[in-house]
Image: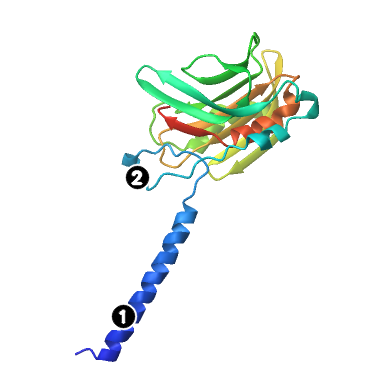
């Protein structure tokens, strides 16, 4: 038979454990805060919605060189996507006055532009069937390895993210490319934000990189 003191001690231990669980819950809550939208749906086991993306328009504009501030101003923009019955959008800091060429893609060009650059694009990719894959390997093959042949200015690797700035020449045309790709293990696709800049805008590469680091997505893409 259990004595009363033993029962009391057990009760104290139980209350202490509950307190510890409460603290653990708080730690898990803070640890689960994300910086972008997960593209896992509930069926893929997403436990909770991530925190909203903080789009730093002022910080992006601060990185635009003084010589370009009269022609390049970033603003918060939502780029709608409509493909048949599927709808979605991307929200990020993007150049004011640049035109979305089609609502099928979140691609921007300066109004009246005729060349292949400059352009600013964000979207998702599967590079084949949209099933979970090693996205770091896929993104390297599709987005980064081809640019390694140029002059790589920056190549940062992080958990679930990679950032590159490189000067490349394609079909005789030289551009400065900014590429930020991000992914989640178990997701059905990864996302990539790319700025292709001509000589006139290459000095603003850091501003485009900062814009690409905070992209919010919703709906289907």
Whether residue 88 is situated above or below residue 22 in the rendered picture = above
Nearer-the-camera pick, 58 or 63: 58
- Give the left or right position of residue 125, taking residue 152 as reference: left
Question: Residue 11 — which label?
Answer: 1
Extreme-right residue of the structure: 67
Quadrant of the frame with the C terminus: top left
Above or below residue 200? Residue 5 is below
Image: 19 above or below 188: below
Q: Residue at x 29, y 88 (%)?
A: 6
Q: Is residue 164 visible?
A: no
Nearer to us in this view, 7 or 171: 7
Secondary structure type for disc 1: helix
Look at the image and tell me in which quarter the N terminus lies.
Answer: bottom left
CB within 8 Å, label 2 to label 1? no
Corner quadrant of residue 116? top right
Q: Position of residue 152 (x, y in %)?
A: 70, 32
Residue 45 circle label: 2
Residue at point 49% right, 41% down?
52
Secondary structure type for disc 2: loop
Mark 1, other Cα within 10 Å: few <14 / some 14–19 / many ≥20? few
Give 191 or 36, whichever is nearer the viewer. Answer: 36
Q: What residue is drawn where x is 42% and y is 70%?
A: 20
Residue 186 in percent (x, y) is at: 41, 41
Q: In which image quadrant can residue 192 be found?
A: top right
Q: Quadrant of residue 148?
A: top right
């Amino acid at each position: 038979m259990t004595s009363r003191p033993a029962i009391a001690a057990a009760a104290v231990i139980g209350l202490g454990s509950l307190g510890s669980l409460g603290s653990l819950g708080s730690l898990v809550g803070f640890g689960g805060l994300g910086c972008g939208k997960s593209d896992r749906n509930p069926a893929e086991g997403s436990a909770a919605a991530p925190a909203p993306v903080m789009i730093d328009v002022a910080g992006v504009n601060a990185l635009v060189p003084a010589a370009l501030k009269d022609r390049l101003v970033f603003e918060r923009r939502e780029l709608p996507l409509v493909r048949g019955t599927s709808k979605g959008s991307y929200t990020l800091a993007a150049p004011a006055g640049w035109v979305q060429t089609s609502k099928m893609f979140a691609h921007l060009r300066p109004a009246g532009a005729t060349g292949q650059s400059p352009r600013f694009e964000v979207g998702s990719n599967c590079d084949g069937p949209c099933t979970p894959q090693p996205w770091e390997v896929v993104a390297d093959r599709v987005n980064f390895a081809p640019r390694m042949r140029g002059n790589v200015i920056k190549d940062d690797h992080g958990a679930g993210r990679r950032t590159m700035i490189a000067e490349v020449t394609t079909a005789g045309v030289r551009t400065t490319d900014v590429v930020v790709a991000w992914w989640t293990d178990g997701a059905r696709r990864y996302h990539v934000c790319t700025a292709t800049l001509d000589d006139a805008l290459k000095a603003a590469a850091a501003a485009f990189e900062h814009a690409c680091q905070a992209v919010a997505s919703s709906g289907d893409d």
